[in-house]
Amino acid sequence: MAQKVLAITSCAVGVAHTYMAAENLEQAAEAMDVEIKVETHGSIGVENPLTDEDIQEAEGLIIAADTEISKERFSNIQIVEVGVQKGIQRPKELIQQILEHQGTTRSTSYESKQTEENKSSRESKNPIYQALMNGVSFMVPFVVTGGLLIAIALTIGGVPTDGGLVIEEGTIWDSINNIGEAAMGFMVPILAAYMAYSIADRPGLVPGMIGGLIASSEDFYAGEGDTGFLGGIIAGLLAGYIALAIKKIPVPKAVQSVMPIIFIPIISTLIVGLIFIYIIGTPVASLFTGLTNWLESLQGTSSIVLAIIVGTMIAVDMGGPFNKVAFLFGVGLIGEGSYGVMGMIAVAVCVPPLALGVAPYIMKNKFQREDVDTAKASIAMGLFGLTEGAIPFAAKDPIRVIPSTIVGSVVGAIVAALSGVGDTVAHGGPIVAVLGAIDGVLMFTVGTILGVLASLLMLRILKKDVNLQETVAVAANNEGSFSSNNEPSTTHDKTETPEEKSISENQKDKSYQLTDLIQPEYIHMNIESSTKEDTIKELINLDAIQPFITDKQQLVNDVLDREKEGTTGMGEGIAIPHGKSDGISVPIVVFGKSDTGIEWNSLDGELVNIVFIILVPAKHKGDTHLKILQLLSRQLMKEEFKNKLLEAESREDVYSILETV
């Protein structure tokens, strides 16, 4: 019977990361022959809930979440707790930790019994950031609902006037608009309440909610305006930590039962309210009002600087902390009637997934076949304003993908800033334009298109070829072409060998097989080296090819020089080093196999187990080796072919497999 593992996934917004982590955990478990059940805490609530029976049967629980998850149900089960990103990026590692009993249990000294790895993971979580993300996750549905209702009311029921769209009083659209404004009014109180809840649990809810209401009400601040979302954040933190401090005060047992429902809420609410009214409220209100006025006054160069900052933060971690902070900034300003920053964000959030969704279709040599399926999902997520759609591509190649998406998001944000694009809801992407929440739809579209094009250009410049067939053929082609004369190398005067004659005859017949360039003696079944350089030397030292080597050191240097131009580790355990050199007299292919793996700096970062080394005379004419490379690379794209090579036990087995190429 398969071992059973449980998991809970949750992200701040509860839309993309939550379900991506769940999907990756499920796929990893299937590959590891482990039964798994994943409970998701998304924006629509808890789905696939874990039962008492599940908990009793399971080996342990993985919590991959950026929000607060109650652990009261799991008092006697080991837990591995990480952020949701690790659930997406390292699902197998998390499952393995449970299977190896590296988790921690709440039954005995939760803190002291945890492993060093889990301890450092817990300590690395910033409680303030986690509280902020928890507040945002509950706030977003209110802002989206309210903003869209207002946008729909204005779009359909609004009457154009010199001062903009105006809704006639007493109409159904006026009622819809009022409902939307009521929903928007909950934005700051909900943010503060669930920040406090994350810190102090239920006792923090009341002081957080009331503190947020005070923060968002200008009646308390002598006409200075309200404190906006900045005040809401402060209120949430104050309420949470004050309630938490009161919880820790020792009290008689007779009072303990009523502390959470009477004393803690009343005392903490009173403290938070008085602090806001008499100490920090007015200064924060003045600061927020000044910030709002400054943002609205930005023109030209100043707005470009802001757009660069916003676009970079949105794209740099695709739904992570920087993205969420920028998003929260834009959402907070919506409540103050300032829509420009959210307009920049609306463009910036959709550029990365749309660009990465399109790229595999138009740059097939830079993406793998499975990327096409990922691209479809990325486009869909981009249309709905979910930056997370680009994460699978960024995880594979962060050094090249992330700069490309940043450039695209910045370009899109700059266009939005300069053209006055506004967004009245806490969301982005084309979907909000369709629903009428975008001011300046035309320039929103232009900004999105230009941003996508900028990302595609950067991807074309930065990304290397990863398709084996095209990569090898192009690389070989760059090292020289061959005429149809099929002349042997004239570098060294020597009698044509049987091998050379065989190759020439096959070239004339235009019948190309890999075995025209490789013999059983050129197959090395047990590579002992563990590095790229040593492996190349080991294969070139094979006794069978020594008669064709005229300068061994020159040959080694030429192959290693080719490696400096870019790795020939193509990924999936395969490397195809190659070089043209005066140190070899005839074209030769050497095969090597390693059971332990070789460090090769491959495109996917994995060790190499299969090596084909292509050695070609510098002045050799003819295109035989190019066509052999093309045939070989096609075969190496097939999982069955690679597996047969890995499972082969003798030279003869390998040679019979290569005869099919």
Image (cartoon, grey):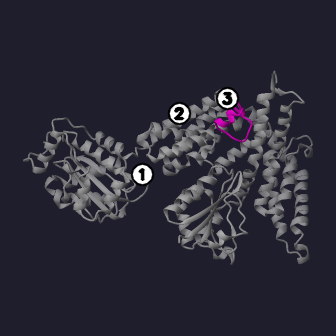
Q: Residue lying farthest top?
A: 162
Disc 1 marks a residue whose amino acid type is Leu
In the displayed structure, 125 sits above or below 213; it is: below
**What label sits on residue 315 in the rendered view?**
none
Q: Nearer the viewer, residue 631 or 487?
A: 631
**What label sits on residue 441 in the rendered view?**
3
Disc 2 marks a residue whose amino acid type is Leu
Q: Nearer the viewer, residue 192 or 238?
A: 192
Q: Nearer the viewer, residue 620 or 143?
A: 143
Q: SS at mark 1?
A: loop
Q: Which residue bears the numbered disc 2?
A: 453
- Marks 3 and 1 sit apart, C-alpha to C-alpha, by 40 Å
In the displayed structure, 251 sits above or below 41; it is: below
Q: Report the magenta residues as a range.
A: 421-441
Q: Give yes or no for residue 423 being in the magenta stretch.
A: yes
Q: Give yes or no for residue 653 being in the magenta stretch.
A: no
Label 2 or label 1, whichever comes before in sequence order: 2
Mark 1: few/some/many CA within 10 Å (<14, 14-19, 20+): some
Label 2 or label 3, whichever comes before in sequence order: 3
Q: Which residue bears the numbered disc 1?
A: 603
- Marks 2 and 3 sit apart, C-alpha to C-alpha, by 18 Å
**Residue 265, percent from left and from top:** 88, 62
Q: Nearer the viewer, residue 546 or 78?
A: 78
Q: Residue at x 42, y 51 (%)?
A: 603
Disc 3 marks a residue whose amino acid type is Val
